[in-house]
Image: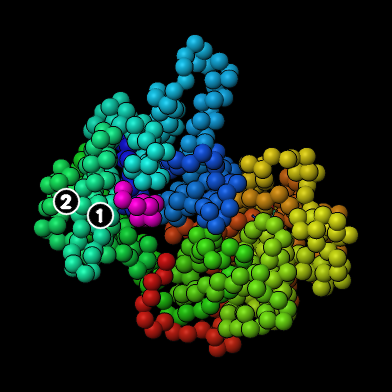
């Protein structure tokens, strides 16, 4: 069977949830026994989102192979339980970079290099490479932005050409659109959909299926109207209502027949969907027994997408522990030694988040000190772990001036410092320690108990490390170093023995948590937080169902 390509475009406006629709469709196809991957095409000029501000773009999602990618890849991995790579995220910047590099090498000698065919050919080669790898029955391609945007045009044109090249029967065009409800008129409006489909027609990519985002149910007459004006069959008008949790969307899409229509139209040989474990998970998410609060201390907290994978990992870890984790978003800038008790009142755990730069560092140290001294379960991730080390060096080892050279290049005790190989690097894009690295766990540690393994592999994204020349001081004063990268003797995990749960990790565990494989450290942290809540009477039964994600 040749690989099938499903193009997913969006119309009318952004933020319709294309990533979740692609992930849900992918999940349904995987549950029917098909081999599926999802690729995101981003129309911006950055080569990757690695250099973008989290306020601008949300979290940067790092893959096993160390690519810095769009956060939608996180959804694909969490839903489909797959590993994505650099090939799953292509940006206009990368396409142009590659074309211009080839032009300089003389690859197009004699030719004028143009958007069509050179840019479109480069886009096509990235899409078809996944198909030709022989690893997938279906490749779902999510095209970023909105149909009609200037930047998106070469992508739509490339998809049109792929349809022509590989044959219509091997491709499918799904268009996600908005059907707004006007309260005053008490009416659903189909005009925006008609317009965005018309734009797609003009570019030559007729939709086969429409997924209509709506606040209220769409009845048969509206479906008929949409079908008539957009030239699709009525069964191919799929309603996508707002959901209590994103993890319910696969069920909603199944109910609407999205997977069945896709399978019929592409002539795929697929079994029945098996969603039993997914159903168990969703039940645990929606109807947990207990409710606990965990503070997430970071400097981008106004923009929850900046910590997307952490939020999702808490949902996975919460479900295993039969409890809902309510995140108390805590701006590190606002935390001081004086107000920390008030800021963290009622929380059963403290997570200090990853990040860059010195803003908010003092607040993070205050939160860590409080969690350490009050014996509240603490989880430090990347910068959060580095801050835990600094806090310990300052307040327990009595190196008052201890710091990271990221915050204070002149510090007398650079307990967190750049590795010599990083000191030589001046470019910012793609130059951090990125992707999967080995980590050997110490026997008897909390980490080893959580993972139940001796050697693990986790994803990284940082420049600074615990300083190997100074780390003896931490050990002398009772901090245990429980995970090391064996190849380079780098500290990966720190713990405190005289504390119920105090773990800092140099890597990003949140990036590898999926519905099928909730991350062991999040499961273990939430368990410790739940125990803390029970001991201090902080946990509450869940009374009503509130949206969870
Ligand atoms: N800024 C720190 C570093 O570069 C931590 C990075 C992070 O939290 N991802 O090492």
Q: Main secondary structure of the magenta part?
A: loop
522 lies above or below 535: above
In the image, taking residue 95 as reference, residue 449 lies left or right, namely: right
Q: Nearer the viewer, residue 288 or 417?
A: 417
In the image, residue 437 lies at what x, y percent? 64, 47
Disc 1 residue crowd, few under 14, some 14–19, many 20+, Cα 10 Å: many
Residue 18 in the magenta stretch? The answer is yes
Disc on the earlier residue, 1 or 2: 1
489 lies above or below 326: above
In the image, residue 75 lies at what x, y percent? 44, 54
Q: Which residues are magenta?
A: 11-20
Residue in the picture at 67% in, 74% down: 335
Q: Is mark 1 within 8 Å of ligand 1?
A: no
Location of mark 1 (residue): 212
Quarter of the image that includes the C terminus = bottom left
Q: How is the image coloured?
A: rainbow
Q: Quadrant of residue 423?
A: top right
Location of mark 2 (residue): 226
Q: Nearer the viewer, residue 18 or 154?
A: 154
Q: Residue furthest right?
A: 412
Give me the C-alpha separation between circle 1 and circle 2. 10 Å
Residue in the picture at 58% in, 46% down: 50
Whether tag 1 and tag 2 are in contact, CB under 8 A, the answer is yes
Residue in the picture at 38% in, 75% down: 546
In this rendering, does residue 532 appear at all? no
The kind of secondary structure element at disc 1 is: strand
């Amino acid at each position: 069977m040749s690989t099938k390509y499903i193009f997913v475009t969006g119309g009318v406006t952004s933020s319709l949830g294309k990533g979740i629709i692609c992930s849900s469709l992918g999940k349904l196809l995987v549950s029917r026994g098909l081999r599926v991957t999802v690729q995101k095409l981003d129309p911006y000029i950055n080569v990757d989102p690695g250099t973008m501000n989290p306020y601008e773009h949300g979290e940067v999602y790092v893959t096993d192979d160390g690519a810095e990618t769009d956060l939608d890849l996180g959804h694909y991995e969490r839903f489909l339980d797959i590993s994505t790579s650099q090939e799953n995220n292509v940006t206009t910047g990368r396409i142009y970079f590659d074309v211009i590099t080839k032009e300089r090498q003389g690859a197009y000698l004699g030719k004028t290099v143009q958007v069509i065919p050179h840019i479109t050919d480069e886009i096509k080669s990235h899409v078809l490479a996944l198909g030709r790898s022989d690893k997938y029955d279906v490749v779902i391609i999510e095209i970023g932005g909105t149909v009609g945007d200037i930047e998106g045009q070469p992508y739509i044109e490339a998809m049109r050409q792929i349809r022509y090249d590989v044959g219509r029967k091997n491709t499918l065009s799904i268009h996600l659109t908005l059907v707004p409800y006007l309260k005053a008129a008490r009416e659903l409006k189909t005009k925006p959909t008609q317009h965005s489909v018309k734009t797609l027609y003009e570019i030559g990519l007729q939709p086969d299926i429409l997924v209509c985002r709506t606040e209220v149910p769409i009845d048969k007459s509206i479906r008929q109207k949409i079908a008539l004006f957009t030239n699709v069959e009525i069964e191919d008008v799929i309603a996508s209502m707002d959901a209590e949790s994103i993890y319910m969307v696969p069920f909603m899409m199944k109910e609407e027949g999205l997977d069945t229509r896709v399978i019929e139209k592409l002539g795929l040989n697929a079994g029945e969907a098996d969603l039993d474990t997914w159903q168990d998970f969703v039940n645990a998410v929606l109807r947990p027994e207990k409710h606990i609060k965990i503070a997430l201390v970071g400097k981008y907290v106004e923009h929850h997408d900046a910590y997307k994978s952490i939020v999702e990992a808490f949902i996975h870890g919460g479900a295993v522990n039969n409890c809902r984790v309510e995140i108390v978003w805590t701006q590190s800038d606002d935390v001081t030694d004086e107000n920390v008790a008030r800021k963290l009142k009622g929380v059963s755990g403290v997570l200090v988040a990853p990040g860059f730069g010195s803003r908010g560092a003092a607040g993070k140290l205050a939160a860590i000190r409080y969690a350490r001294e009050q014996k509240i379960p603490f989880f430090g991730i990347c910068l959060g772990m580095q801050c835990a080390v600094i806090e310990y060096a300052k307040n327990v080892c009595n190196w008052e001036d201890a710091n990271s050279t990221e915050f204070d290049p002149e510090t007398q005790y650079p307990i967190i410092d750049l590795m010599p190989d990083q000191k030589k690097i001046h470019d910012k894009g793609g130059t951090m320690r990125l992707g999967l690295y080995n980590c050997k766990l110490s026997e008897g540690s909390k980490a080893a108990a959580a993972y139940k393994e001796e050697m693990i592999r986790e994803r990284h994204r940082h420049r600074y490390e615990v300083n190997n020349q100074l780390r003896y001081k931490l050990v002398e004063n009772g901090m245990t170093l429980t995970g090391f990268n064996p190849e380079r003797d780098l500290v990966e995990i720190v713990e405190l023995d005289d504390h119920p749960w105090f773990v800092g990790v140099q890597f990003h565990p949140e990036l590898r948590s999926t519905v099928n494989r909730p991350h062991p450290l999040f499961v273990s942290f939430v368990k410790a937080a739940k125990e803390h809540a029970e001991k201090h009477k902080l946990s509450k039964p869940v009374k009503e169902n509130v949206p969870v994600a």
